Amino acid sequence: MLNDTLSKGLTYADTLTVTLGGSPLTLDEDGAGTDKDGQYYLVQGTYSDTTGTTLKIVFKDCVDLFKDVDAGTDIVVTYKATLNENAVITDAGNPNTVNLQYSNDPNEDTDNTNEPGKPDEPNEDAPTGKTPDDEVKTYTTALKLQKLDNKNTPLAGASFRLTGNGVNKVITVGTFYVEDAAGTYYKLNDGSYTTTAPTDATASSYADTTKKYKVETTQTITQNTTEGSEVYVEAFVDANGVLTFTGLGDGEYKIEEIVVPDGYQKAADVTIKIESNPNLTKANWTVTKDSETALTQNAEFQYEFNVVNVQKSNLPTTGGMGTKLFYLLGGMLAVGSGIVLVTKKRMSDAEK
């Protein structure tokens, strides 16, 4: 029997397979019962956001199952777990611990006479052995984007898209607009949202005149896990101009401003490269912005950086007051030139 404890930051992904000497064994879908159709079964504990999940993979009728198997034959147990919203981003990581428990009694009977519901698990009263714990850690990290204007004042109203690959799940803390019939927001063509309902005169400015949205501040994004595919998440900064992405691993990410605050120029795209050199003590992250700036962790173990918007210049518009002002100044200069010319000519005549 294999015992595995997944920490609170990991969620079992229901992808269990077992092979013996390269050949697959069959899963008993009925679980811990007397059904003989499968060669092993899974006992999955209830997830807790403080202790995580326990898994037990139990081999059925071990004496018969392994009696003709040569020593040294590989038994390979494979399954996946994904990071969840409770994932730890410190150097403590997100561990899962595995050990193998087995009976030391050669006369142990495996004819399902053990405790009901546990027919093939080692009898608690019988001598058992257990291998040392084998621990594996999954590390993850976070980015914190601070949106500022050119006077270093926090700036709201911007939305960003983070694009990368190989990410299973990202927990984003910002402002999300989620479709909801009871919501109070409408989406505009430029990607921003408004509480002003559309009218016949303004309908063309709306992405949809019937869909409504509500605001959420945290959202879990499950990513497309196809190898080599590019995935992205989008969100607005919060009222303090902050947007965080948690659940990121090794890879290169592009961060693009897709909704720009009114009166400001679009910020340049940002490229973030995340690399790790992990061991059981720490992840040893290296996080670089735009291939040149090494980022450091803040007190919350996030890699923080700023994105600055510059205000648009208020140049006069064609046909507006500014143009008329230029015309007026030009006319005054022309009149002034005429006065100078006339004066010079009169002075010249007087000299004669």
Image (tube, rainbow, N blue to C red):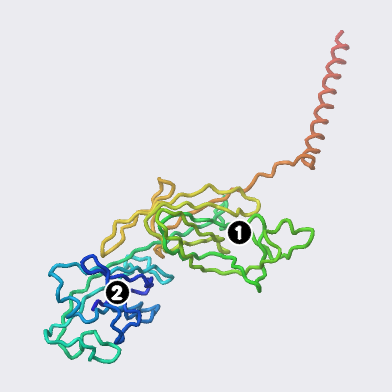
Residue 223 percent coordinates (x, y)? 46, 62
Other-residue count near label 2 (Cα within 10 Å), few / some / many at <14 / 14–19 / ≥20:
some
Relative height, residue 247 to residue 269 (above, below): below
Q: Quadrant of the C terminus?
A: top right
Secondary structure state at the residue bearing disc 1: loop
Residue at (42% x, 63% y) in the render? 168
Label disc, if present, on residue 157 of the rendered structure:
1
**206 vs 49, nearest the viewer:** 206
Mark nearer the viewer, 1 or 2: 2
Please state if 84 lies on the left or on the right of 202 as rendered. Answer: left
Check disc 2 and give the amino acid type: Thr
Relative height, residue 330 to residue 166 (above, below): above
User: In this figure, which residue is indicated by the disc labeled 2?
Assistant: 26
The answer to which image quadrant residue 318 occupies is top right
Choose the circle earlier in sequence order: 1 or 2. Answer: 2
Relative height, residue 218 to residue 153 (above, below): below
